[in-house]
Amino acid sequence: MTPRTDTGTDAGAASKAGPAEKSKAGRTEKSKAGRTEKSKAGRTEKSKAGRTEKSKAPTSSPGDTVPADPAADESTPGTRDGADRDTTDQKRDARAGSAGGAAKKSGRSARARNAESATTVTGSLSSVVGTIGEGVRSLLGRPLASYHLVLTLALLLTVFGLVMVLSASSVEGYSQDGSAYGLFATQVVFALLGLVVFYFTLRLPVRLLRRVAAPLMIVTTILLALVLIPGIGTLSQGARRWFVISGLSVQPSELVKVALCVWGAHLLASRRREHAPLRELLIPLLPVGVLICLLIILEPNLSTTITIAIIVGTLLWFAGLPIKVFSAFAVTGIAIAILLALVEGYRSQRVMSFLGGIDDPQGAGYQARQATYALANGGVFGVGLGQSRAKWNYLPNAHNDFIFAIIGEELGLIGGLLVVMLFVILAFVGFRIAHRCTDPFLRLMTATITVLITAQALINIGYVIGLLPVTGIQLPLLSAGGTSTLTVLAMLGLLANAARHEPEAVVALSSPPTRRFGRLFRLPTPVAYQPSRAEVLRDRLDGRRSGAAPARRQRPTAAGPAEPARSGWRRVWPGGRGDASAMVPSPAAPPASPGRYSPARYRGAPTPGATRAGGGPSRTRYAGAPMRSEPRAHTGRPARR
């Protein structure tokens, strides 16, 4: 028999097995896809249902039992995989939430640390400011604080001015005279003379100063007239302003500033009245001021004319000129200054260049433009002392009118602010002295000097930095100018003299332990303010007219001269600003009996008299004057009954 082969059978089996395997593979893939879709749908439905049930289900207590759901245990492999994925997602969300919470906590902690550091810095700054404030208050609380501050400021400004004049004038001096120290040597000579004048005005008694005020004013006015005569006055740069004495030039218009400050204060203090008429305030101060301005205009010198107007206006303001009258005079003065500026050719070009009407970098606006370039070159910290480029004949008058530009270039913004701060401190000290002095003459004089020096500094700095038109007013004690340095040091000496006459300073300097500085320079002991006989009579008359009685004055004690009691009226800051309407009654001054003064206090003061029979005050009499009721001795005839 032929054996049976299984080839066909195997092929048929293989052909039968192929579709079966394909069908099984298709079913497997379909079942997997279905389970995946069902698991996804189930997870979505379960998560939605779970959130809904959780939101709807009431809160159960720990003791409550939840019945088991048999359907929950019947889980397919797809549902188990979905549950595992849900658990993984929840864990991931939990980790992300914990990371976000940690980040939030770290942010809050960083903000808290920043707030603590800011609080610490603020507290330390406040403590430093408080310490500085306490130190300043303790310094100003000393009786001789004003006096020492004036001495310190005068020394600092003089030394700093000499250093800057040497730096700014070295190039011009070498190009003109062959020596870089020529202008500096002249400035040193005038600074030494100014220190001598400072010492002389510091020692000068107040009564002697008031006596020489009128002669000093007459002499300086005559010098102003003599300088205009050809052959006597020196003509330089188109102006006749100087006398040349032994190689040193003296400018009378600078000397007249000091004389006008002293004489004007003496004149207005001697006419001090509550209801003073306008004529007493204006005459002869205003006519003399106009005469001086006319003589200075003829030189010509507009900048000094402006300073004279500032002096007269300050004296009238603090003397109590009504505001309406003062405003009218101020407007008139400004109009005259503008007119004078427009009349002269070079002045009008400066004004028009400042206003923008002339744009000529090489003409009228050359100085102002070069000063701006110098300040810009300096920056914040400057190029260094002596390293200025503008002084190499780029900026005219770099050592004189525009020395602040050299300061700004070499020392930068810091140096410029330092100069401004020194003049601000000087203004504060000057007004402080004017406020604390009891002598009306010293109050007017110190207030006027303070305003004059501060105004000159502000005007000079203003036109250097471009805020004002160029006027030619010098920077006090810093610009090169011999007579200007001399007069400013004389004014500062008068300020120091007034500071030594403050009531607390008088008591401190009159105490037994003498100051070393006073012993070294042999400074006299200041005398407390004592009104003259004319002032006492005027106060009595004013008291009778206004119906207020003069106040009783205290006798000096062993501790030192006491501050004289204020009258029933006190003047507004610093020395009598305001007219009669600005005078307010002082409740701290108790009224005394009219006509009763302490005879030991004043020379020729009325003696305390007894009251009349009717109880009223008796008539007062002065030392050596007989009473009306006493018989007078007549030669050759009997006394009249």
Image (cartoon, rainbow, N blue to C red):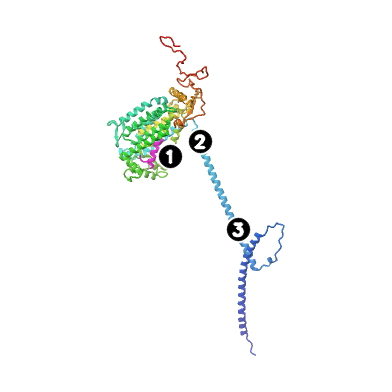
Q: Residues within 10 Å of mark 2 (few under 14, many from 20)?
A: few
The magenta-colored residue range is: 453-470
Residue position marked by numbered label 1 in the rendering: 418
In the rendered structure, which amino acid carries the disc numbered 2?
Answer: Gly
As drawn, the residue found furthest toward the bottom would be 1
Q: Is residue 511 above or below residue 182?
A: above
- Magenta stretch, overall SS: helix
Of callouts 3 and 1, the N-terminal one: 3
Instruction: Out of 626 and 173, give the one closest to the viewer.
Output: 626
As drawn, the residue found furthest toward the left would be 231
Give the alpha-carbon distance from disc 3 to disc 1, as whole Å: 62 Å
SS assignment at label 3:
helix
Residue position marked by numbered label 2 in the rendering: 135
Q: On the rendered structure, is 165 left or right of 501?
A: left
Give the alpha-carbon distance from disc 3 to disc 2, as whole Å: 59 Å
Q: Residues within 10 Å of mark 1 (few under 14, many from 20)?
A: few
SS assignment at label 2:
helix
In the rendered structure, which amino acid carries the disc numbered 1?
Answer: Leu
Q: Which mark is residue 95?
A: 3
Where's the C terminus, which quadrant? top left
State if disc 2 and disc 3 touch (CB < 8 Å): no
